[in-house]
Image (spheres, rainbow, N blue to C red):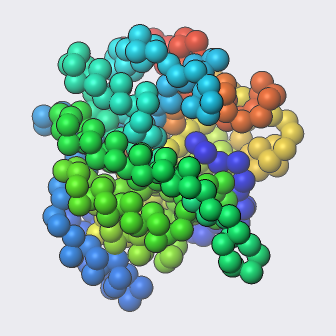
């Protein structure tokens, strides 16, 4: 999860699903605002849909994976070793066969190669991390350009294309950008820039292509232009961040899933992130916005109920997240961004994963 600022707004009521299960063909929308989305959708080159299967076996309950252990970091820090990554993959493959990663370079390259070379039973939705390329002044003019970021973004896209085409047995989709459009993003990207990167990947990679963002972007009419050029939609929904108590958390998630499905009835909707933290700080934004109690028991209740729903409905998802990541967030040890994992940073299981085979 990459959230630090959230504009808390009045939540709209549940919207009924406008089509049968998301992986089947849905009836065309009659909403005039969907014309741009529908037109782009019809003109696309016919890539296959996102298919969370190994053979005919559904593996759609997936896991989001950040590989950085204590003392490691993607920002100027040490990267995990090949042995670290191998240990993680063998642990995760005992519980999941579907993995989400957020970037394509560095550890992700090694992960894809390990899965292929060692025949680990996992498929990967690979990310291409896209960051802010321009800073604008108050009058709308360009105040600053970030050429190093442009080069990094291009490197992410090129590596994602390379890996998707080199390892078709492992990479089953590419997600270009993560939470770049929602209003509270700290790494906002202009829609036209993101669209250009998406088009590059769709033109050159032989897998479905998407971008991931919060439900509060995907359930707006503004999202239709972007939706028209992706093969499926990846939405995030955190009941805990949106002030929900545990007893309403899965109902909230279902409601937001329904809203996004109704807004984009032609698309398959995948839940790219959701979760329940096991600790949170008593100060700052998380204290103001989060009403739910953090804890391992609460996480287990949410995880069990969420997985029961997605399994019954065959809704592909990536639970957030595999491991606690102590490099994230502020310095305080209770900072919530450090505590979304189903396993602790030392790879020992929390209550939700104890005794699971």
Give percent across and percent down for residue 60: 31, 39
Q: Quadrant of the C terminus?
A: top left
Q: Furthest residue to the front?
A: 147
Q: Is residue 250 left or right of residue 242?
A: left
Task: State the residue in front, 92 or 296.
Answer: 92
Q: Residue placed at 40% from the left, 15% from the top?
A: 82
Q: Residue 316 sits in which quadrant?
A: top left
Look at the image and tell me whether residue 95 can be seen: no
Give percent across and percent down for residue 70: 63, 17
Examine the rendered structure and indicate whether residue 95 appears above or below residue 175: above
Give percent across and percent down for residue 128: 42, 47
Task: State the residue in front, 237 or 140.
Answer: 140
Q: Is residue 333 left or right of residue 176?
A: right
Q: Residue 188 sits in which quadrant?
A: bottom right
Q: Quadrant of the N terminus?
A: top right
How many numbered badges does the structure rendering display? 0
Q: Residue placed at 66% from the left, 27% from the top?
A: 327
Q: Furthest residue to the right?
A: 283
Q: Furthest residue to the bottom?
A: 32
Task: State the residue in front, 339 or 251.
Answer: 339
Look at the image and tell me whether residue 180 can be seen: yes
Examine the rendered structure and indicate whether residue 214 appears above or below residue 33: above
Q: Residue placed at 48% from the left, 50% from the top?
A: 151
Q: Residue placed at 31% from the left, 60% from the top?
A: 200
Give percent across and percent down for residue 209: 31, 55
Q: Is residue 112 left or right of residue 88?
A: left
């Amino acid at each position: 999860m990459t959230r630090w600022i959230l504009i808390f707004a009045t939540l709209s009521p549940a919207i009924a699903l406008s089509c049968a299960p998301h992986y089947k063909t849905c009836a065309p929308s009659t909403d005039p605002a969907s014309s741009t989305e529908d037109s782009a959708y019809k003109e696309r080159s016919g890539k296959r849909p996102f298919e969370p299967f190994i053979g005919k076996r559904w593996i759609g309950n997936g896991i989001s994976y950040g590989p950085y252990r204590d003392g490691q970091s993607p920002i100027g820090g040490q990267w995990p070793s090949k042995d670290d990554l191998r240990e993680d993959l063998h642990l995760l493959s005992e519980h999941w066969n579907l993995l989400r990663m957020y970037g394509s370079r560095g550890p992700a390259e090694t992960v894809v190669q390990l899965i292929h070379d060692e025949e680990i039973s996992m498929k990967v939705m690979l990310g291409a991390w896209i960051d802010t390329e321009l800073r604008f002044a108050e009058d709308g003019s360009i105040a600053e350009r970030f050429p190093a970021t442009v080069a990094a973004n291009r490197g992410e896209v090129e590596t994602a294309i390379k890996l998707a085409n080199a390892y078709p047995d492992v990479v089953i989709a590419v997600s270009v950008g993560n939470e770049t459009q929602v209003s509270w993003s700290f790494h906002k990207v202009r829609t036209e820039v993101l669209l250009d990167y998406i088009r590059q990947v769709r033109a050159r990679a032989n897998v479905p292509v998407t971008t991931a963002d919060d439900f509060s972007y995907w359930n707006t009419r503004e999202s239709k232009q972007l939706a028209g050029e992706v093969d499926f939609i990846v939405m995030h929904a955190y009941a805990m961040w949106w002030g929900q108590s545990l007893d309403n958390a899965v109902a909230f998630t279902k409601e937001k899933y329904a809203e996004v499905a109704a807004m984009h009835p032609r698309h398959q909707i995948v839940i790219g992130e959701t979760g329940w933290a096991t600790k949170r700080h008593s100060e700052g934004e998380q204290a103001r916005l989060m009403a739910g109690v953090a804890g391992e028991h609460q996480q287990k209740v949410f995880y069990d109920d969420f997985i029961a729903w997605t399994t019954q409905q065959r809704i592909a998802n990536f639970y957030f997240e595999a491991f606690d990541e102590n490099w994230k967030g502020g310095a305080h040890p209770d900072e919530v961004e450090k505590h979304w994992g189903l396993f602790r940073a030392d790879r020992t299981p929390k209550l939700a994963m104890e005794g699971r085979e």
